[in-house]
Image (spheres, grey):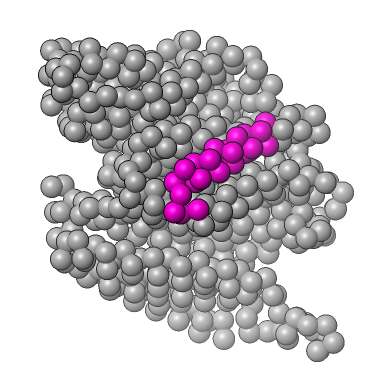
């Protein structure tokens, strides 16, 4: 049996429930959370290796054969992201152990972080479109709680907008599902793909595809990112890092899944649209990143730029570009966590969030300064770090496909990323120190260790690409050839007709 | 029958959009609730609500109605219930903190 597939969702879910009852003892909460994260990482690695050896795994719940039951499907793409999610959320939690205020810890901060991870992992692994909706909701409900937790005026006002926009996005998801079910009559993704291929992607199905595009664009922040900078810059650093690392990436993943597996027939409409939206996202994100002076807002606009860049791979639509996007997704989860935690630490240490009110921090906190420098290089795509390989493959794919405009937009945006972060670096870390040794707030080791580990991880992914390469190649191969996925799901059960 | 239900869905969406766009927080939340009812109705219509019998063996000879959309709606109702409950609590907390339920005013609070 492939029961291992359900573990990445069940472990965090059960941990969340256990943590609820451990509310009085923060120490016990931390212990259980650490053990759970470690087991989650172990399970993810094991799942990834199993997929390498045995091909795509499938788990039919309750023994209902596809296309009738709900099922989980694990391919390399999903497994890689589950592994990254586990590691990154683990490191963010370790940071949160040191940085979260007592009143948050008592108010179920950890349980809801685990529910969030459960929702993310469920969304990555599910092979059923309605189940994807449910997992999205699990993730979103947890995120609603986290975004509002302990909030003051502005955080609550910002949360209201975040919740409202997501409720409307979920509504669109249900509308799209209703139309799709009315047209195709199935919810199993592989089966939908078969039936769409049989029926041909006519105008009706293309319209449904566009509704799905709107749904995932809202969730991922592709063009429809107007809600993102506000709601990602108001919560405390660990929450913002969880959101930046995980939430939008799930939207990106869902977009890849749906538009490579199901709606890939009429590429001039859907993929042309995705390309245009990606370029506009890159442009808007770049302008936002250089326009503001609040470092949290600058970091949030960097999330937007990254989403645009990943979507270039989907718009180009060939195997090399997919490979680039998979690398970039993994890289971006790591580096956005690091960026948001570093920015959060800066605000915690100085009590300021504007770049013109900070100066010379590198003298006070040299390690933090160097970590921020690494983040900047990695995000811009400088070779020894993890951002490089993703950009190279996306670029290769774009050249192969002849999409030179997309290529140009992608690499121009990298310059904006570099400029926006360089501005933070030069203003906040260089120059005269404003904090004397005496009044310098200490940055304790407990916070620095997770930050350094994330920094080491981005270097490790960059240097050790060789280790990841076979998994990423397999992930991109499955994305480019949906029949492999369909064969793995519907293999022995021949679809009807 | 289906035509009536589709029209009703349309009416519900219209009402919901009107409520969503209003300045009052509670109205907006009611809007999301009505919006979810509209989509539930849409889902059940898509399953072919009008024709067919109860999908239970031995009750009739068929044709049976598709049971899946009803399972989907049940799930969706639970989710929208949870979301609405959360939104109401959030609205109350926001009202306690800011002393207003006017969304236009909240927009000004945000950038203070």
Quadrant in which residue A471 is drawn = top right
Q: Residue furthest right?
A: A492
**Residue at x 16% of width, y 66% of height:** B100
State the image coordinates of residue A458 (x, y, percent, origin top left).
48, 20
Quadrant (top left, top right, bottom left, bottom right) of the C terminus of chain A: bottom right
State the image coordinates of residue A133 (x, y, percent, origin top left).
55, 57
Quadrant in which residue B75 is drawn = bottom right
Apparent side of residue A309 relative to residue A471 in the rendered image (left or right): left
Taking the magenta stretch, the answer to whether it contains residue A258 is no
Is residue B88 visible in this depiction of the protein? yes
Is residue A316 visible in this depiction of the protein? no
Q: Which residues are magenta?
A: A22-45
Looking at the image, residue A47 lies above or below residue A196:
above
Quadrant in which residue A153 is drawn = bottom left
Give the mark count.
0
State the image coordinates of residue A331 (x, y, percent, origin top left).
49, 26
Looking at the image, residue B29 lies above or below residue B65:
above
**Residue at x 54% of width, y 16% of height:** A460
State the image coordinates of residue A209 (x, y, percent, origin top left).
54, 52
> Closer to the camera, A364 or A297?
A364
Apparent side of residue A308 relative to residue A191 in the rendered image (left or right): left
**Residue at x 26% of width, y 36% of height:** A297
**Residue at x 47% of width, y 10% of height:** A383
What predominant SS class does the magenta segment belong to?
helix
């Amino acid at each position: 049996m492939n029961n291992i597939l359900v573990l990445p969702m069940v472990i965090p879910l059960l941990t969340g429930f256990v943590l609820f009852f451990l509310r009085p003892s923060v120490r016990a909460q931390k212990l259980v959370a650490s053990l759970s994260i470690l087991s989650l990482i172990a399970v993810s690695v094991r799942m990834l290796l199993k997929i390498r050896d045995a091909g795509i795994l499938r788990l039919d719940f309750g023994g209902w054969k596809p296309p009738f039951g709900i099922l989980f499907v694990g391919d390399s793409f999903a497994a890689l992201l589950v592994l990254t999610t586990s590691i990154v959320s683990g490191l963010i939690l370790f940071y949160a152990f040191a940085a979260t205020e007592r009143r948050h810890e008592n108010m179920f901060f950890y349980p809801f972080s685990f529910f969030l991870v459960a929702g993310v992992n469920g969304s990555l692994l599910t092979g059923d479109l309605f189940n994807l909706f449910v997992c999205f909701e699990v993730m979103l409900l947890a995120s609603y709680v986290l975004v509002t937790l302990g909030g003051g005026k502005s955080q609550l006002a910002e949360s209201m907008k975040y919740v409202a926009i997501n409720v409307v996005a979920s509504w669109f998801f249900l509308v799209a599902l209703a139309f799709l079910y009315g047209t195709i009559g199935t919810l199993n993704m592989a089966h939908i793909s078969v039936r769409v291929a049989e029926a041909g992607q006519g105008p009706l199905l293309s319209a449904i595809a566009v509704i799905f595009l709107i749904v995932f664009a809202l969730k991922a922040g592709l063009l429809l990112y107007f809600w993102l900078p506000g709601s990602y810059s108001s919560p405390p650093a660990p929450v913002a890092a969880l959101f930046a690392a995980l939430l939008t990436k799930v939207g990106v993943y869902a977009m890849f899944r749906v538009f490579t597996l199901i709606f890939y027939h009429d590429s001039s409409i859907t993929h042309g649209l995705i390309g245009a939206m990606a370029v506009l996202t890159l442009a808007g994100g770049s302008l936002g990143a250089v326009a503001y002076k609040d470092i949290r807002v600058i970091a949030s606009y960097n999330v937007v730029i990254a989403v645009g860049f990943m979507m270039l791979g989907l718009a180009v639509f060939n195997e090399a570009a997919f490979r680039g996007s998979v690398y970039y997704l993994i890289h971006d989860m790591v580096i956005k966590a690091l960026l948001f935690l570093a920015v959060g630490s800066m605000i915690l240490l100085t009590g300021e969030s504007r770049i013109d009110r900070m100066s010379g921090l590198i003298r006070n906190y040299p390690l933090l300064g160097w970590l921020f420098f690494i983040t900047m290089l990695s995000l811009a795509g400088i070779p020894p770090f993890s951002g490089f390989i993703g950009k190279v493959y996306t670029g290769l794919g774009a050249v192969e496909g002849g999409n030179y405009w997309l290529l140009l937009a992608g690499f121009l945006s990298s310059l904006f990323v570099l400029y926006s972060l360089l501005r933070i670096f030069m203003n906040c870390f260089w120059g005269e120190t404003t904090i004397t040794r005496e009044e310098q707030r200490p940055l304790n080791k407990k916070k620095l260790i997770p930050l350094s580990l994330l920094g080491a991880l981005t270097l490790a992914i960059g240097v050790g690409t060789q280790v990841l390469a076979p998994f990423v190649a397999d992930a991109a191969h499955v994305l480019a050839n949906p029949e492999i996925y369909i064969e793995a799901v519907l293999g022995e059960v021949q679809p009807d007709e | 029958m289906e035509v009536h239900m589709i029209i009703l869905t349309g009416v519900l969406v219209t009402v919901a959009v009107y409520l969503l766009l209003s300045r009052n927080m509670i109205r907006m939340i009611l809007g999301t609730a009505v919006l979810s009812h509209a989509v539930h109705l849409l889902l059940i219509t898509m399953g072919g609500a009008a024709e067919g019998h109860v999908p239970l063996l031995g009750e009739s000879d068929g044709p049976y109605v598709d049971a899946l959309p009803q399972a989907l709606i049940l799930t969706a109702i639970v989710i929208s219930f949870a979301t609405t409950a959360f939104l109401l609590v959030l609205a109350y907390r926001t009202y306690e903190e800011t002393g207003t339920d006017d969304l236009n005013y909240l927009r000004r609070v945000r950038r203070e």
